[in-house]
């Protein structure tokens, strides 16, 4: 099976290394099919490479990978939306199988690419696009197929989990924790995609689409990043019995006609499998009607873990070609399934406010909660040295719209200086 690789960076380099230097065990595991690295497309032929690839294999001409009839499978590890999407489409039209780690392209264009692959009678594999080295897609595709998937809860962005961990454990504020993450190689120079929850939104869109057999476009995923989280929130969270994480949640409503898909920071109860996910690790907790809860955890990024998934896909493809069973109808997407607007999602909340330290304050605040039909689960008030106090409330479940109205009305009360934090509680 001749492989055309696009990209020789963090992941592509490790994939090339595996194919070039572990050929024999890979051949055995691929039912005797040899995985031959045939050509590698890069942007800059002069760039110094960490992994040595014979120079005659390198090209900067896309046609030499996408249109070469000798190439059976195109492995796309370039990233970005275009030209990557266009390259994948061209490879499929040329009846080449495709393996990709590109979550952006899959989240936005996955169903169209899978449909095209079906028409061309070739396969698309994308284990590496979500959760790096964690076997997620194959788990849905094979092991959990007997289930109706009910819920997917995930800590699925290593950068934000590292940053939040530093804020929780070292008391660092966001900017300091981000600088630490950058120095440790866990955050990009421009970390917006991670901190803003965009990366997690692409991933949960893919997982929800596959888990629920629904078309969940990433633009429909409710998204809030961690930019507003303050060090003090971790202290209150712990006092109340929670950790603070950026979570991605996808839930299927009973009947299966609507799904929830959202990414936001949330208080996660101690003892929940996601509460103890440390550092840059990722974890995905899947609930199925037969299996109950399944936790998958591991390295969600990095060249070697991600290459593990990419090369695993190549082996799976080689085996299915050998068995002549490629292009099984692996995924179906029901176009009628709707994504629930965030306003209708039932959730619990945590509010931290600064209030005047005088009689009647709590009565005024509680009255707003009562009028909005939001019931309070816990309340903490801390004295402070000036004439205001910090007041923290957690609620029982209510619609997000009711919680937002409560937040806005409380912020307008004379006795309230500011609502400084609003977070959901898992
Ligand atoms: N890094 C991770 O931990 C990780 C984890 C999961 C998924 N992924 C996904 O894997 C993909 C690759 O990520 P990466 O971290 O390996 O990226 P990277 O280190 O930036 O490498 C990208 C490679 O693609 C090549 N490239 C980029 N645009 C190209 C174009 N238009 N034409 C030809 N070659 C092009 C670059 O060529 P030059 O070297 O010549 O510039 C480079 O070799 C992305 O989709 C990413 O989201 C990465």
Image (cartoon, rainbow, N blue to C red):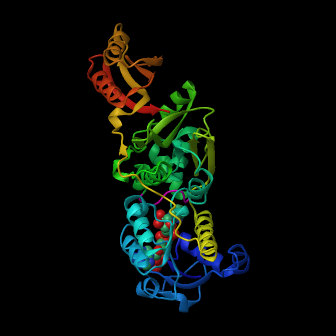
Residue situated in front as seen by the camera: 335 or 424: 335
Over which residues does the magenta segment extend? Answer: 184-190
Determine which quarter of the picture holds residue 36: bottom right
Q: Residue at x 59, y 82 (%)?
A: 1
Tell me where residue 328 appears, x and y as whole percent.
53, 65
| Horizontal and vertical percent position of residue 180 | 53, 52
Q: Nearer the viewer, residue 330 or 369?
A: 330
Which residue is rendered at x = 46% and y = 40% of the image? 251
Q: Residue furthest bottom?
A: 56
Q: Residue at x 41, y 72 (%)?
A: 119
Q: Residue furthest top?
A: 359
Give the prevailing secondary structure in the magenta stretch.
loop
Q: Position of residue 351 (x, y in %)?
A: 41, 26
Q: Total marks drawn?
A: 0
Q: Picture quarter containing residue 185?
A: bottom right
Q: Is residue 128 magenta?
A: no
In the image, residue 426 above or below residue 331: above
* Vertical order, 282 against 104 (above or below): above
Q: Residue at x 43, y 41 (%)?
A: 256
């Amino acid at each position: 099976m001749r492989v055309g690789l696009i990209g020789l960076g963090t992941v592509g380099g490790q994939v090339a290394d595996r194919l070039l230097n572990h050929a024999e065990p890979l051949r055995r595991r691929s039912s005797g099919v040899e995985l031959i690295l045939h050509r590698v497309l890069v942007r800059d032929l002069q760039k110094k490479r960490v992994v040595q690839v014979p120079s005659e294999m390198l090209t900067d001409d896309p046609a030499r990978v996408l249109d070469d009839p000798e190439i059976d499978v195109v492995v796309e590890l370039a990233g970005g939306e275009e030209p990557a999407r266009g390259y994948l489409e061209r490879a499929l039209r040329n009846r080449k199988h495709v393996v990709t780690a590109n979550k952006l392209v899959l989240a936005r264009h996955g169903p169209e690419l899978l449909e095209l692959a079906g028409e061309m009678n070739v396969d698309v594999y994308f284990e590496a696009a979500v959760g790096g080295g964690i076997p997620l897609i194959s788990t849905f595709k094979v092991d959990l197929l007997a289930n109706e998937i009910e819920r997917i809860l995930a800590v699925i962005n290593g950068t934000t989990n590292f940053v939040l961990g530093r804020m929780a454990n070292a008391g660092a504020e966001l900017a300091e924790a981000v600088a630490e993450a950058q120095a440790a190689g866990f955050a990009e120079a421009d970390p917006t995609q991670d901190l803003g929850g965009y990366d997690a939104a692409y991933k949960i869109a893919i997982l929800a689409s596959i888990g629920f057999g629904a078309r969940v476009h990433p633009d429909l995923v409710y998204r809030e990043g961690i930019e507003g989280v303050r060090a003090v929130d971790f202290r209150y969270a712990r006092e109340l019995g929670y950790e603070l994480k950026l979570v991605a949640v996808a839930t299927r409503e009973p009947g299966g006609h609507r799904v929830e898909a959202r990414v936001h920071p949330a208080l996660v109860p101690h003892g929940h499998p996601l509460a103890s996910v440390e550092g840059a690790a990722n974890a995905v907790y899947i609930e199925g009607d037969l299996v109950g809860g399944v936790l998958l955890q591991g390295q969600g990024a990095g060249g070697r873990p991600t290459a593990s998934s990419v090369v695993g896909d190549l082996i799976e493809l080689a085996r299915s070609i050998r068995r002549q069973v490629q292009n099984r109808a692996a995924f179906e997407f029901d176009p009628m399934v709707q994504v629930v607007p965030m306003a209708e999602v039932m959730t619990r909340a945590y509010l931290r406010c600064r209030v005047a330290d005088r009689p009647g304050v709590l009565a005024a605040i509680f009255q707003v909660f009562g009028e909005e039909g939001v019931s309070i689960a816990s309340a903490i008030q801390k004295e402070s040295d000036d004439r205001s106090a910090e007041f923290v409330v957690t609620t029982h479940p209510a619609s997000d719209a009711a919680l937002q109205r409560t937040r806005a009305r409380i912020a307008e009360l004379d006795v309230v200086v500011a609502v400084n934090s609003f977070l959901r509680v898992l």
